[in-house]
Every structure is written in C-alpha cells, then in structure tokens.
Amino acid sequence: MKTEIMRKIVINTSFEDFCLSHAAFLRLRELGQKDALQEVDLGAYWPQAAAPQEPSLNRCGREVPRDDRHLVRVVEELGMRANGHAASLKIVEIPSDVTWKIEKVGGQERVSEAHRIWG
C-alpha cells in the first residue's frame, strides 16, 4: 500500500484576520524562521497574553508562509496559546502534490486546490 505524503497548512477559522500570539511569534524567532526574524515585533509594545484578549494592535506573524514547517511546529506545540487577537488557528493536511491557496469563505479561511481560469 502506497503512503501519500501530506503537507500541513495553518489556517484561521475565526472571522478575524490571521495572526499569531506574541508568544508564538517569539517561538518562531527562536526557531530561526526567517520571515518572523525580519518582521517588526509589534508585540513588544503590547506584551500581554495571547488569545482573544491579546491587544488588537498586536498582529504578529502575518508574513510567515502558512505551510512553513516552523509555523506548523509552533501551532502544534502551543495549541490555543498560538492564537493571536481573535484568531482560532487550525492545521489542515492536504496531499503534498496539490497546488493550493487559502480562501476566505463566509469570513473563515479554508484551503482549496488552485485551478486554472481563463477569461
């Protein structure tokens, strides 16, 4: 039996924009994630705890690719503590050979297969 290799992608299932908690963002930096290292640390100005209570101006990790292995690891490690302001992060697994994109449907994100479209 052939085992299919899967890709993990982080999405936001709340109606707000994707963002990480400051703790998750700092963990990404510890792991050396290049996009997190280049991003301005807005959480340094709003250092309170994660989850919906985190200040709305603290929107960390928005430039990190959603299939980044470090991002997936941090969300797996921290669970709900990885959620930024009003975010509800979830890991979705898809076949690794699929060309994918993230869409917002009804305000919530989902992963869908990218299809070709002609006008």
Image (tube, helix red, strand yellow):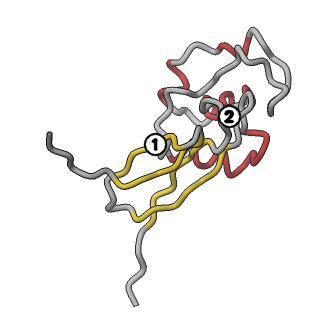
Residue at 50%, 18% in the rendered image: 38
Q: Which residue matches tag 1?
A: 103
User: Is the N terminus in the top left, top right, bottom left or bottom right quadrant?
Assistant: bottom left
15 or 43: nearer the eye?
15
SS for dot 2:
helix
The amino acid type of the residue labelled 1 equals Glu
SS for dot 1:
strand
Number of numbered discs on residues:
2
Q: Reading the chain from its start, which is encountered first: label 1 or label 2?
A: 2
Check the image and name the residue furthest to the left: 119
Disc ID at residue 28:
none
| Residue 80 placement, left or right of 74 | right
37 or 115: nearer the eye?
115
Residue 106 to residue 44: above or below: below
Residue at 52%, 33% in the rendered image: 33
Q: Which residue matches tag 2?
A: 27
| Residue 69 placement, left or right of 78 | left
User: Is the C terminus in the top left, top right, bottom left or bottom right quadrant?
Assistant: top left
* Contact? badges 1 and 2 (CB < 8 Å): no
| Residue 88 place in picture, x, y as percent | 70, 42
Residue 33 to residue 99: above or below: above
The amino acid type of the residue labelled 2 equals Arg
| Residue 6 place in picture, x, y as percent | 45, 65
| Residue 108 placement, left or right of 112 | right
Residue at 46%, 37% in the rendered image: 65
| Residue 107 placement, left or right of 44 | left
